[in-house]
Image (cartoon, rainbow, N blue to C red):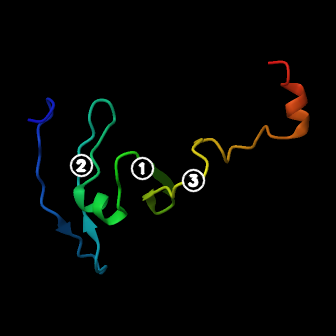
Amino acid sequence: MVNGCKRVRRKTKSLNEGRTGVTILLSKLTSKAQTVIPREIRARLDLKPGDVVRYRHTDAGVVIDKLPPQSDEDALASFNEWASSADDRAYADL
């Protein structure tokens, strides 16, 4: 056990449905909706502590990838819904 969690090792299995190079890796969801990204995936995406992982829901499923580093450290730097001059005037007194 590590930090009260049981360590489970699973073998990597290849999916043979006419697709080549497809690998299935499993991880278990905790009661707090947390999971461990498998070592093979972390290595392939070059994930390091502090990296941001992006989840994109598509018609084919969920795509997980590494969010490219932003020049601005603010995670909401690209959020510009209320960035007009009218909004600046309206919220100036807050």
Which quarter of the figure is the C terminus placed in?
Answer: top right
Name the residue carrying label 3.
70
Dot 3 or dot 1: first in sequence order is: 1
Using the image, determine if residue 74 lies above or below residue 66. Answer: above
Name the residue carrying label 2.
27
Q: Residue 89 in the image: state x and y as whole percent.
A: 90, 29
- Left or right placement of residue 89 versus residue 3 in this view: right
User: Dot 2, crowdedness within 10 Å: few (<14), some or many (≥20)?
Assistant: few
Closer mark to the observer between disc 2 and disc 3: 3
Q: Residue 40 in the image: state x and y as whole percent.
A: 24, 62
- How far apart are the alpha carbons under marks 3 and 1? 11 Å
Closer mark to the observer between disc 2 and disc 1: 1
Using the image, determine if residue 19 lies above or below residue 39. Answer: below
Identified at 25% across, 63% down, the residue is 24
Q: Secondary structure at mark 1?
A: loop
Name the residue carrying label 1.
51
Q: Secondary structure at mark 3?
A: loop
